[in-house]
Amino acid sequence: MTARARALRSAWPQYLAISPFYLLFTVFLLGPTLFSLYLAFHRWDGIGEMQYVGLDQFRFLIEDQTFWLSVRNTLIIWVLSTVPMLLLALVLAALLNSTKRLVGFYRVALFIPNITSVVAVAIVFGALFATNSGLVNITLQGIGLPGVPWLTDPWAIKIVIAMLMTWQWTGYNALIYLAGMQSIPSELYEAAKIDGAGPVRAFFSVTVPMLRPIILFTVVVSTITGMQSFTEPQVLFGNNSAVNANSGGPGQAGLTMVLYFYRTAFGQNDYGYGAAIAWAVFLIVMVFTILNWRLVQRRAD
């Protein structure tokens, strides 16, 4: 028996201990992923025989105007939600870092939106932004401003979805920034104070530069999660058959890429084309993630 074989034999309890993870990973993640790639080259309704179509699904995808509409919607919602969300999270973290009382309460309050059911929050947002009976429009009209068709206007729909995502993830990112701020050596702030820097100057000259790796992490994670938005438009508009069932609201203004994939695969039973959409979404998310990572990293350098 060779030394390598003896080493493997002596370590079999450790391999056995970690084997459940790899078995579950293979069955529930790797296997379906490879099968979706196989499906993307076939036409299949989930019941009948698969028909090999080569690259036809991808050729149709390039000419599919609804797919490109979903890409535009996703990018707009992602920008409207990610930029204010990260800026607001940074400000909240700075305020919380300077707070001495009720710190634990504020941390819990910031994290609650992230653990609240997205479905429940979307239903509440749908009620708040209802055109005729929503609290937001009632408040606007109460101070003399006209009501806004939040759930019927194309841009208002995107803003509502973006606000929902911002509300859900701002506290989560603020706590990540707070953890980073608390690891910055206090000597840097003392040196900045000796040099005459005020709180604002110290924030931009010390805090933000020291947080750049964490900012890079939050930008990458926000890009990945923001461009896979699905539950928000699905719950807000999915059951509204009076306008356009499962299509992201009037004019498909809230139709995101993942929602379009879901509608195609599980609403129209076109699993082959749905798989092609899923792989296109994967490539788009990967490209934007790499671009954001390179952009933020270059500024950090």
Image: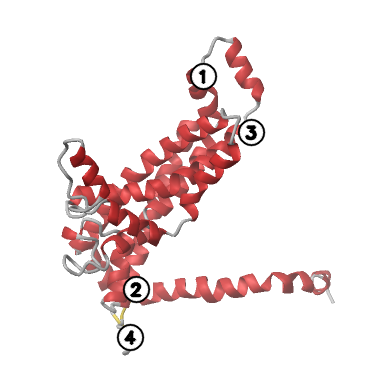
For marks 4 and 1 on the same chain, the one whose residue lies earlier in the sequence: 4
Looking at the rendered structure, the kind of residue marked 1 is: Pro
Looking at the rendered structure, the kind of residue marked 2 is: Ala
Closest to the observer: 123 or 46?
A: 123
Closest to the observer: 9 or 77?
A: 77
Asked whether the residues under the numbered discs 4 and 3 touch, taking CB atoms below 8 Å apart as contact, a structural biologist would say: no
Q: Residues within 10 Å of mark 2 (few under 14, many from 20)?
A: many
Q: Residues within 10 Å of mark 4 (few under 14, many from 20)?
A: some
Q: Nearer the viewer, mark 4 or mark 3?
A: 3
**Disc 1 designates what residue?**
199
**Disc 2 designates what residue?**
40
**Disc 4 designates what residue?**
50
Q: Is residue 191 left or right of residue 134?
A: right
For marks 2 and 3 on the same chain, the one whose residue lies earlier in the sequence: 2
Q: Nearer the viewer, mark 2 or mark 3?
A: 3
Q: Could you tell me residue 34's position as x and y percent?
A: 46, 73
- Residue at image location 38% in from the left, 56% down from the top: 121
Closest to the observer: 225 or 273?
A: 225
Residue 38 sits in which quadrant?
bottom left
What is the spatial separation of the Cα atoms under label 4 and label 2, in whole angstroms? 11 Å
For marks 4 and 2 on the same chain, the one whose residue lies earlier in the sequence: 2
Q: Could you tell me residue 265's position as x and y percent?
A: 31, 74
Q: Residues within 10 Å of mark 1 (few under 14, many from 20)?
A: few
What is the spatial separation of the Cα atoms under label 2 and label 1, in whole angstroms? 55 Å
Asked whether the residues under the numbered discs 4 and 1 touch, taking CB atoms below 8 Å apart as contact, a structural biologist would say: no
- Label 3 sits on a secondary structure element that is loop
Q: Is residue 138 left or right of residue 5?
A: left
For marks 2 and 1 on the same chain, the one whose residue lies earlier in the sequence: 2
Residue 183, numbered circle: 3
Asked whether the residues under the numbered discs 3 and 1 touch, taking CB atoms below 8 Å apart as contact, a structural biologist would say: no
Q: Is residue 55 visible?
A: no
